[in-house]
Amino acid sequence: MDGRARGQGILNNFGGYRCREGAASADGQRTCRSGVRKIRTFQSSPKQETRGDQMKITFGRTAAGTLLLLFVLSSSVLAQQASLRRNVILRRDPSTSSPVLGHLAKGARIMLVDASPDSGFYHVRTEDDQIGWVFSKYVIVSESVPPGTPTDAGTSTAGGPSPAATCDSNLWNHVYHSYRLIVKQQCIAVTGTIVDATATQRVKQSDGVRHEGDGDTHGWLNVDPEFQNLLNAGNMSDEDGNLVFEVICRFPVTQKDARSACQGYTDHIVLPPVGSRVRLVGSYVQDTFHAKWNEIHPVTSITVIP
C-alpha cells in the first residue's frame, strides 16, 4: 500500500484498513479514493453481550439439570433386581429375530439396565456381566428398597442358612461409585474367620485390612463351609479364595474424586483382629471392576462370635 492510501485509511482492530470520514468514493461504501477496499468493523453491543451471558447461564443450568436427572435415574435402577420365572433366551436386541447371546436358567438373578420394558423385552445384565434382552413376561422384578429402610433378609438365598439380618440402607448414600456394583442380595449375614488381606501386599497393616484411597477397608473373610458358594472365580484368583468385605468411609479419604461420597460421614465399626471368627452383615454384591469378585459392601456390622 502506498503512502497516499495510508493517509486516507486508518488501521482497524483486525489489521485491515477502513476509510476516513469523508474519504469514501462515489459509491460511499466499497473503496476510498485511493482504491483501498473498505473493511467494516464490528463491535458487540452491551445488549448482545447480555444475551450471550444469558445463553451461557441457561446452558449451564440445563447441563446441571441433565446430570442430576441421570444420577437419579442411575440410582433408581441400581436397586432394580429381578429373577427369571422360566428358562429364557438372552438376545442382542429386543426382537425374536435378534442373534442369541446365551440361555439363562429359571431362577437366575439379573439386574435391569432399564426399569421399563421395550417392545416386550427387558434390557438386563446377568451375574456373569452379560448385557442383553429377555422377554419381559418371564421376568420377576424385585421391589426396590427405599433409602433409609432397613431390610430384613431372613434366610439367605445366596449362601447357606443365616440368622435374620438387618442392614442400614442409608450406607448406600456413601458408597463410592455404587454403579459398579451388582447387588445380588440386599442384606445377608455371613460367618467366617478374618484373615490378613495385607499379607501379600507391599504395605502391611496391623489391623489386617487394606486402607483404600476412597476411605474403605478391603478386608478378607475366610467364609464357613456353608457360604463357599458366595465366592466366584475372581475371589479365587485375586483374593486368595476369600470373600472381600468393605467397611465404607473407615479411613481418611486420599482419593480426590471419592471425597464427596464420605463427606459428613465416618464409620466407627470396630475391626476385630485377624483370626477372629465373626458374623458379618451387609449387602452381597459383585464388583464389576477389577477381577469381578464378590464382596460384602457396604458392611453394616461385624460381631465377634465367642
Image: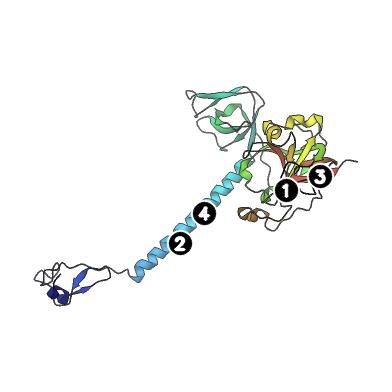
| Cα separation between marks 4 and 3 | 39 Å
Q: Are marks 2 and 3 in contact (CB under 8 Å)?
A: no
In the rendering, which numbered label is found on residue 302? 3
| Cα separation between marks 1 and 3 | 24 Å
Q: Is residue 31 visible?
A: yes
Where does label 2 land, which residue?
57
Dividing the picture into quarters, in which one does residue 113 lie?
A: top right
Where does label 1 land, which residue?
203
In the rendering, which numbered label is found on residue 65? 4
Please name the amino acid that badge 1 sits on: Val
In the image, which is nearer the foreground, mark 4 or mark 3?
A: 3
On screen, residue 32 above or below 300: below
In the rendering, which numbered label is found on residue 183? none
Please name the amino acid that badge 3 sits on: Ile
Q: Which of pointers 2 and 3 lies earlier in the amino acid sequence?
A: 2
Please name the amino acid that badge 2 sits on: Ile
Q: Which of pointers 2 and 4 lies earlier in the amino acid sequence?
A: 2
